[in-house]
Amino acid sequence: MSLDDFRTHVRARVLYVTDLAYEAKGRRYCDEDIFLTSRLREDFDIALCHPLDAAALMETGAFDVVVVRNSGPVLHYEAAYEDFRARAVKNDVRVYNQLTGRADMAGKQYLVDLSAAGYPVIPTVDRAEDLARLPEVAEYVAKPKAGADSIGLRFLERPEPGEREWAAGVLVQPRIHFRYEVSFYFIDDTFQYALYAPDPERRWKLERYEPTAADLAFAQRFIDWNDIEHGIQRVDACRTPEGELLLVELEDLNPYLSLDLLDDGTREAFVANLKASLRTLTETPAQ
């Protein structure tokens, strides 16, 4: 057997990080990861592990890439996650998603920064002296920068200087009344599909959404800003009554994909593109 033939027959080894027991409102993380790993196993050797075990297993050297998927909010295991990141960076481990993400992967400070820079984002501030940047509305939202799944989210009247909402690690936004929320899903920097929630009160009751060219340009702008070469990203936005799209969040760590809501053709295309992306990454020499 030639060296090229040998390489063709060697399957890359994937450590797939997921919390199959995590219960998320309106979503079944475990079902999605059971499906995805069953399909990835067609092309890769797969081992599943809990996020608390990822760092130690990664350091065995038995895997070519670590895939972080439905691992639950990092808020529940911050120390373990920071340890995992530090070891992965130190040892040049291939991690999918790439650990250089500037959005939710690094907390929600990016919403403050993008808002100040004039991007189409829900107006966001984290200092009392910037309160004038927010519109006058009946209600505001305070949320921790390290939050996820609405953990720690509070609704309040207009906060005043000196209130605890201005403590470090908290951001404040106006409570936006919108027509619907829509999510755009990407592999690397390539758009895959979009879903939306027609009823604002039922965030995870999603339907297929056909984006316009303007919609895709909106989502692509944030993907380009984040500059992740390999990984899955979800751009969440809301449509205002005036028709404008505003960014709600850019999930670049472990976005839920709602694959069960897709038609067979779209789901199969996503799986094929994910395999191709992982294959490209595992064949790229580690830095």
Image: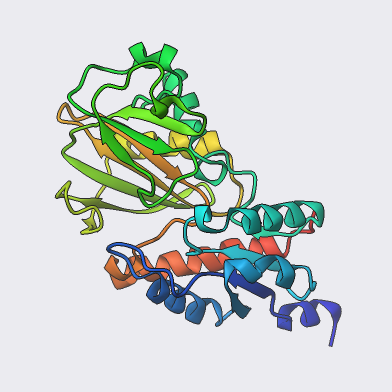
Let me know if residue 121 appears in the view.
no
- The residue depicted at 57 percent of the width and 65 percent of the height is 276
x and y percent of residue 139 in the render?
21, 28
Name the one closer to the observer, 113 or 234: 113
- The residue depicted at 46 percent of the width and 73 percent of the height is 33
Name the one closer to the observer, 213 or 16: 16
- The residue depicted at 69 percent of the width and 58 percent of the height is 84
x and y percent of residue 61 in the render?
80, 72
Query: Does 158 sit above or below residue 150?
Result: above
x and y percent of residue 287 in the render?
80, 52
Left or right for 225, reference 165 = right
* Coloring applied to the structure: rainbow
Query: Does 125 sit above or below residue 208?
Result: above
Let me know if residue 60 appears in the view.
yes
x and y percent of residue 160 in the render?
33, 17
- The residue depicted at 17 percent of the width and 46 percent of the height is 200
Name the one closer to the observer, 21 or 191: 21
